[in-house]
């Protein structure tokens, strides 16, 4: 049975967790967001957000982006490998379409899995 929960253990919380992910080269992106990834030793993927005021001016928009991405992550987490993920917004997305953001994120998860499998095969 698929797990759809999103407990606190699946959140990146400490600055050290974020710093470790920022030092990696594994990433996927689209016109809305960039997702950085780093393998972890846990039994589940974890996600964190780095949505700055510089990239997305209004708090309402930042919160909407986070809510959409969290929901997509929650529904796709059983297909993702053990990774720590940091999601960053691209600048200039003032008038974003929620449906387009959701579709774009849903397309990025399989791309991320494919890139991860290629990078782990090369090691």
Image (spheres, grey):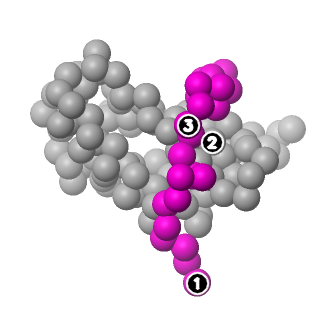
For residue 115, say whether it is visible.
no
In the structure shown, which secondary structural element does the residue marked by tag 3 occupy? Answer: loop
Residue hosting label 2: 84
Of tags 3 and 2, the one toward the viewer is: 3
Of tags 1 and 3, the one toward the viewer is: 3
- Residue at the spot 65% in from the left edge and 26% down from the top edge: 16
In the structure shown, which secondary structural element does the residue marked by tag 2 occupy? Answer: strand
Q: Do the residues labelled 1 and 2 touch (CB within 8 Å)?
A: no
Q: Does the magenta stretch include residue 54?
A: no
- Residue at the spot 58% in from the left edge and 84% down from the top edge: 1
Magenta stretch, residue numbers? 1-24
The vertical placement of 40 against 103, above or below, is: above
Marker disc for residue 25: none
Residue hosting label 3: 13
Q: Position of residue 34 (x, y in %)?
A: 45, 32
In the structure shown, which secondary structural element does the residue marked by tag 1 occupy? Answer: loop
- Residue at the spot 69% in from the left edge and 52% down from the top edge: 82
Q: In the depicted view, which residue is nearer to us: 119 or 49?
A: 49
Residue that lies at the very extreme toward the right in this rendered image: 123
Residue hosting label 1: 1
Identify the image quadrant of residue 119. top right
User: Cα distance, mark 1 to mark 3?
Assistant: 28 Å
Disc on the earlier residue, 1 or 2: 1
């Amino acid at each position: 049975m698929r797990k759809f929960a999103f407990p606190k253990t699946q959140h990146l919380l400490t600055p050290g967790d974020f710093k470790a992910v920022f030092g990696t080269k594994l990433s996927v992106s689209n016109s809305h967001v960039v997702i950085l990834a780093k393998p972890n030793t846990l039994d589940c993927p974890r996600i964190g957000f780095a949505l700055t005021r510089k990239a997305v001016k209004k708090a309402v928009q930042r919160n909407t982006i986070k809510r959409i991405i969290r929901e997509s992550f929650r529904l796709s987490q059983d297909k993702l490998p053990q990774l720590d993920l940091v999601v960053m917004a691209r600048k200039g997305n003032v008038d974003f379409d929620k449906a387009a953001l959701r579709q774009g994120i849903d397309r990025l998860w399989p791309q991320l899995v494919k890139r991860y499998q290629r990078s782990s095969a090369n090691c």
